[in-house]
Image (cartoon, rainbow, N blue to C red):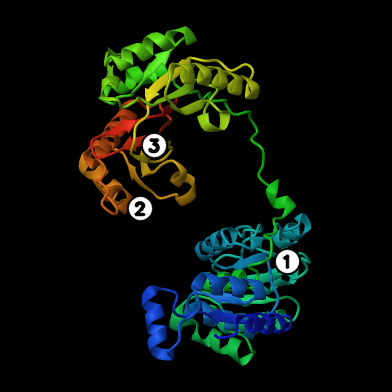
Amino acid sequence: LSDGPRFIKLASEINKNKPIVLIKAGRSAQGQRAVMSHTGSLAPASAVFSAACEQSGIIAVESIREFFNMAKLFQLGIMKPLQRMIILTNAGGPAVVTTDLIDLSRSLSLLELKTETKDSLRKALPPMAAVNNPVDIIGDALCTRYESALKILIEEKDADAIVTLLTPQLMTETEATAKLLAEYRKKKPIIPIFLGGTVIEGGLAELRNNGMINFTFPKDAVEALDNLARNADKIYSKLAQTSVPLPSKTPKVQTEKMLSYRDTLSLFRKYGLKLPGILLMEKKDIAGVVKNIVTATKIAGNDVGADLGTGTPIVYTLKAISPDVIHKTDMGAVKLGLKTLADIENAWNEIVNNVISKKPDAVFEGMLLEKMVAGKEIIIGMKRDAVFGPTVLFGLGGIFTEALKDTSLRIAPIDKKDALEMIRGIRGINILSGLRGEKPVNFDGLADIISKISRLAIENPEIKEIDLNPVMANQDDAIIVDVRVMI
């Protein structure tokens, strides 16, 4: 491709009348080299080329399978986006799979059928049939039952298409049903998905004889429809959003609260988990505590001392401890990089003012004063699943937590060997192993925290969630800097 602007202009004009589908080769480093060896020219950068396709309305697909499935869609005469789907099926399993695919797609949705439509379906179908969407006419359906349902569903004006699933069961009339779909496609787009390999060959031949095609699997059809409608906003039925019946009885409210810092400290000590810092109850306590830190005094069982005589100043962090402060940064409840007594006292005032301005009735347990620790930010968490019990999460913390979502997950119990596998299971393991001469972090220390959190969660079933974010990991240690326990 040598003239990018002309390519975009031409593609934009063509797309007004006929969709363009494109499969781009040479997206990987090896692929780029292959392109160069075959064509003697460098392929455009993938990101730039993707943007050009998006701008000009080209449907860019990632596989040859997707490429041919788009051609199938066009062969059915479907050139414009269709979004609101009805599923008609003679088997529940494939219908649920198709429902999942549609619901999880970028652009498609299942239509909530009108009450009168469902009433008509109940009258026309056997009692065992499901008349919501998907409409399941059950396994003994003859061609006539497909027709009874289609006559009613065709009248749903808000439906863009009917995805029709057929599986070969004892009573299934494959060829006759294929002929029927060819007739009804004149009234509304029909997407055939006949499953069954050689058993359904007769039906596939009938589809071809009538100018139709078959999608081999539900994913093929849904993916093609989603690609065609990829730039359209997803449409949700207003009825679908309110169709879940309200419970007849008011459910019992389960109160959830954050465990106090003192109780958390006590609990963690039982499992050999250290929490650094000193909890200050009043501002006037700051001077005495800082003096003790400077003289390397052991306070509250934690070595928080440092030697100012070396000329290396201590840098402190001050944060509010309160059940009303869940996300400290959002509330302005944490101050970093404090170097002097005046810095800490000013930070105390700022934190109190920040929290009270956002939550006037906030209750303070105190302020936690910590030495700032250098290292890589890690998140270690536990969440109690209703089915599997305690699940433990490990991943990169700080800004990487939400941005990359690079985590690994295990179900407790987890020993140190399992924990080390978790750590090595994240994509960003090189960040922890040491890049460009950096020292690797203390994997054993991280594994120790993970295994102890696993045991703690198993032995304390009242705990719902644990959030250690961040844990600061360096070559010497892994230190829990912030903790939240929900019970």
At 63% from the left and 73% from the top, the residue drawn is 228
The amino acid pointed to by label 2 is Gly
Question: In front of the other: label 1 or label 3?
Answer: 3
- Where is 49 relative to 370, above or below? below
Decide if residue 55 is on the left or right side of residue 63: right
Figure check: 453 above or below 50 = above
For disc 3, the marked residue is 381
The residue that mark 1 highlights is 159
Identify the mark at residue 68; answer none if there is no mark.
none
Who is closer to the viewer here, 204 or 120?
A: 204
Residue at (52, 69) in percent of width and height: 47
Q: Badge 2: few (under 14), some or many (20 or more) residues near its Cα, within 10 Å?
A: some
| Image-quadrant location for residue 132 | bottom right
Which of these two is toward me, 54 or 431? 431
Asked which quadrant contains residue 21, the reply is bottom right
Of the two numbered discs 1 and 3 on the same chain, state the one appearing first in sequence. 1
Residue 222 x/y as whole percent: 57, 69
Q: Nearer the viewer, mark 1 or mark 2?
A: 2
Q: Determine the CA span between mark 1 and mark 2.
A: 45 Å
User: Callout 1: few (<14), some (14-19), or many (20+) C-alpha neighbours within 10 Å?
Assistant: many
